[in-house]
Image (cartoon, rainbow, N blue to C red):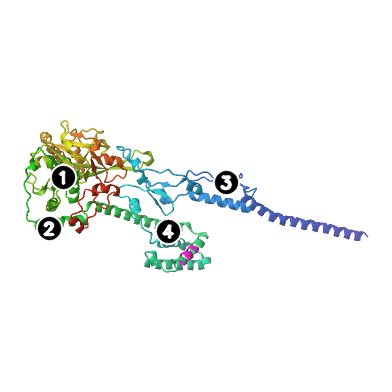
Amino acid sequence: MKGGGGGGGGGGGGKRRWKVLVIGVLVLVILSMLVPLAFLLGLHNGFHSPGFVTVQPASSFESFTRINATKHTQRDVSERVDEVLQKINPVLPKKSDINVGSRDMNVTSGTDSKKRGLPVSPTVVANPSPANKTKSEASYEGVQRKIVSGDETWRTCEVKYGSYCLWREENKEPMKDAKVKQMKDQLFVARAYYPSIAKMPSQSKLTRDMKQNIQEFERILSESSQDADLPPQVDKKLQKMEAVIAKAKSFPVDCNNVDKKLRQILDLTEDEANFHMKQSVFLYQLAVQTMPKSLHCLSMRLTVEHFKSASLEDPISEKFSDPSLLHFVIISDNILASSVVINSTVVHARDSKNFVFHVLTDEQNYFAMKQWFVRNPCKQSTVQVLNIEKLELDDSDMKLSLPAEFRVSFPSGDLLASQQNRTHYLSLFSQSHYLLPKLFDKLEKVVVLDDDVVVQRDLSPLWDLDMEGKVNGAVKSCTVRLGQLKSLKRGNFDTNACLWMSGLNVVDLARWRELGVSETYQKYYKEMSGEDESSEAIALQASLLTFQDQVYALDDKWALSGLGYDYYINAQAIKNAAILHYNGNMKPWLELGIPKYKNYWRKHLNREDRFLSDCNVNP
């Protein structure tokens, strides 16, 4: 009985121990399943954060907060995470957006900014000239021209001389190589990821697909430069390449290889961009300084016509040396420009029979210039054409030198555009101007006009001015002061003095001879010639020092400058000016001329001459 009882008790105790062991194992199994699951759920739902995630943006974006997943389902949390990621995407700007010029600022509308989560950037207007603050108001319409870049952001067009974006806007054409550029971009990305994918033995199929697509794109691009040259199945090839690239991006790759490849592509692109930028600057300067083919044709045709005519000598007129008449001097080698200056002056004159024009030109254009004014007389006025290279003066090697233009740039005072430079063109006398007292020894006063001006008022009152003993009557430009010219290093001068401009100059030849202005200029020029400076810089300094305290300031309404480089000139100021001066590179007879200012010049051009149509002259 005892043995049986003991056996039964032992069996019962064994069963109880077995049950406890089974329960313990089950508990451990359940715990082993619950702990990782709880850990994963806790990490995803924010157990390791105080209930929200804060994103610190790289710019002045609003912080994105409050992603609390403890009260939401997993689907809701995923949607919130996607929303945050979409907001984070625009935080890092593209490199092209960072390196834009100081005047090319990103501009987006308020509504677009709210939709995208982007900040609203103010429209930045180019700093107007301090001398005429109303220019920006009248030309605001020109500043509002905008272009759409590749990333669909708006940028203010940089409206200035040689502006590429302005040229692009005016000569906009439909893009003919959009798909070609897309293929090039995909090819660059595929080449960047291929070395890393090729090192993965398990992705041999993806490696073959990438290599095949890269070779296929290289073959197509070698034969195609426009979308019309692409094969019919190019859309499918683009989709296939895009799928391959997407699959390659899903694998962990060696970032160093990708970074190295993309940097190589970036360096090549920057080198190419710098090359094209330098080339465009060179071509722009070449177009500015080279005589157009049509004007060269006109000069040659007129020269041949002159020698075909019976009379080869100009009749000697007493008006040329009569001091009681009103004498104008124009120094030019441009036939059309000289013609516009004289025509516009005569049209607005009350009595043109008292006007005498002296045109100084070189030997190459001398006969053409004479023939033009024989064919196109200017009402009752008298025109004399002089070959400066054949004049009997002391200087036997004399050559024609046109009014010198100096491009002056200095930092703007605008805090919003600290890297922006203000640019002005200063037009001053050339060495040929210092020969006027000898060339016209019987005259006492002349008005000197540059060949890039258009007259809009009667200039007769200029001979009645009391210049208070000054030699040169000119409009002063206070946008640039003498102290701002770094090249002006010698001589005692007032640093706050305004610069004077050529274009319209009333010259008292009698006072000029009395003070020996030409001798003073030659003295300064010879003293500076030994220094390591260009002849243009020396001429600028010598002219400014020579006429120091000898310039009589004309009223600003007599002449308005800047029509050859400034897009922001007020239309009312143009209407009120007696003379419009196209100083700058964008002359009205060039294709580069500012379109809205060309009509003031064109209307004084005689278009009826058959040589203009024969030579296809159409300024």
38 or 466: which is nearer to us? 466
Where residue 256 sits: x, y (%)? 46, 57
- Residue at (42% x, 47% y) in the render: 106
In the structure shown, which secondary structural element does the residue marked by tag 4 occupy? Answer: helix
- Mark 4 or mark 3, which is nearer the start of the sequence? 3
Q: Which residue is mark 3?
A: 53
Above or below residue 78? Residue 193 is: below
Q: Residues under labels 3 and 4: Cα distance?
A: 35 Å
Mark 4 neighbour class, 10 Å CA radius: few under 14, some 14 to 19, many 20 or more: some
Where residue 469 sits, quadrant-wise, is top left
Q: Which residue is mark 1?
A: 330
- Mark 2 or mark 3, which is nearer the start of the sequence? 3
Q: Amino acid at mark 4?
A: Lys
Q: Residues under labels 4 and 1: Cα distance?
A: 61 Å
Q: Which residue is mark 2?
A: 304
Q: Which residue is mark 4?
A: 261
In the structure shown, which secondary structural element does the residue marked by tag 1 occupy? Answer: strand
In this picture, which residue range is highlighted in magenta?
236-243
Mark 2 neighbour class, 10 Å CA radius: few under 14, some 14 to 19, many 20 or more: few
Q: Are marks 1 and 3 in contact (CB under 8 Å)?
A: no
